[in-house]
């Protein structure tokens, strides 16, 4: 369904600027979980997704059982990118493993090594793990874009989304999106696959603005909000509290903490209201289809 039609069904003007502020990488660490819990209950974000192979996934899903009205999806995880903090797949899939027995660090290494059947098996296992833990995810999306890195993977991703009745994160292949996907080297047949799906699709997708200071990050995000176009935008953040553990895991620890802070600020909420941006969730979008 087109964004304009969804907007009208939700009672918004057809040219409404709808926004999902989405927390990625939940389950990666306690710090990511703690920041996301606070953001979903007291902050601005309307969605998150969990990395099921990571050690803190279970803790977050236990919390979700008592907050089951929130948007919590599966962040299909097929890579393990950090230098010394690594994880393994849930399935026995040799193609998903690097020479150290962990998931590959980059999507291209996965494409060169893992079969579509291994990808499908691992993706299904991650969704099923959540169900076995007693929670119902609201959607699926993809860590580092690996599930969409080649056509066979994308077909498995969409097939499993249908099987489990979960909306997959996909873009509406309008001309601008098509041009961007082609420029990034995506298989042109992926555009046809996206076009065939009847689930809610995104008009735009991007990460939070980076900066060298907190004020730079905040003002960069505000410019992103000001420049939103009509449709459904997916603004991805990677929030985490600051700690020595996060400093050890990733050089991006400071950015992650600043993203958490920006989306806890009343000033940010006021900015969104001032711009007449409509905050939506996967649950809300699905209700309109």
Image (cartoon, rainbow, N blue to C red):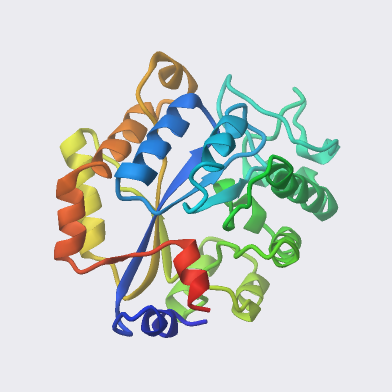
State left or right for residue 152 relative to residue 227: right
In the image, 56 versus 153, the foreground residue is 56
Q: Which of 179 and 192 is in front in this view?
A: 192
**Percent position of residue 88, x then y:** 72, 30
Q: Position of residue 265 (x, y in %)?
A: 20, 43
In the rendered image, the vertical position of residue 44 relative to residue 163, given as above or below? above
Q: Can residue 201 be seen in this view?
A: no
Residue 170 seen anywhere in this rendered image of the structure: yes
In this rendering, position of residue 27 left or right of residue 122: left
Which residue is the extreme one toward the top?
Answer: 244
Identify which residue is drawn at 71% across, 47% down: 131
| Residue at image location 64% in from the left, 62% down from the top | 166
Above or below 9: residue 242? above
The relative height of residue 268 versus residue 51 in the rendered view (above or below) is below
| Residue 118, percent from left and from top | 82, 48
Q: Quadrant of residue 85?
A: top right
- The number of discs equals 0
Q: Is residue 91 above or below residue 20?
A: above
Q: In which quarter of the image is residue 164?
A: bottom right
Q: Residue at x 35, y 23 (%)?
A: 242
Front position in the image: 85 or 106: 85
Taking the spot 21% from the left edge, 59% from the top edge, the residue there is 272
């Amino acid at each position: 369904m087109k964004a304009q039609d969804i907007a009208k069904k939700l009672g918004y003007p057809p040219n409404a600027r709808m926004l999902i502020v989405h927390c990625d990488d939940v389950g990666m660490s306690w710090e990511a979980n703690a920041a996301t819990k606070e953001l979903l209950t007291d902050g601005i974000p309307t969605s998150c997704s969990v990395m099921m192979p990571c050690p803190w996934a279970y803790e977050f899903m236990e919390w979700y059982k008592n907050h089951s009205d929130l948007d919590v999806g599966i962040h299909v995880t097929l890579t393990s990118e950090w230098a010394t903090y690594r994880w393994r797949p849930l399935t026995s899939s040799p193609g998903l493993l690097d020479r150290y027995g962990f998931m590959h660090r980059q999507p291209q290494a996965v494409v060169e090594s893992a079969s579509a059947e291994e990808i499908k098996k691992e993706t299904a296992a991650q969704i099923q793990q959540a169900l076995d833990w007693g929670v119902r995810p609201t959607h699926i999306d993809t860590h580092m874009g690996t599930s969409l890195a080649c056509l066979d993977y994308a077909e498995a991703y969409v097939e499993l989304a249908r099987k489990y009745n979960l909306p997959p994160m996909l873009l509406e292949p309008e001309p601008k999106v098509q041009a961007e996907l082609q420029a990034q080297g995506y298989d042109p047949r992926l555009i046809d696959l996206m076009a065939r799906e009847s689930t809610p699709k995104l008009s735009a997708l991007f990460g939070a603005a980076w900066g060298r200071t907190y004020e730079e990050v905040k003002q960069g995000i505000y410019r992103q909000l000001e420049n939103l176009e009509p449709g459904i935008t997916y603004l991805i953040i990677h929030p985490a509290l600051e700690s020595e553990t996060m400093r050890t895991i990733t050089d991006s620890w400071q950015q992650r903490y600043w993203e958490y802070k920006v989306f806890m600020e009343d000033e940010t909420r006021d900015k969104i209201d001032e711009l007449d941006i409509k905050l939506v969730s996967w649950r809300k979008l699905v209700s309109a289809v």
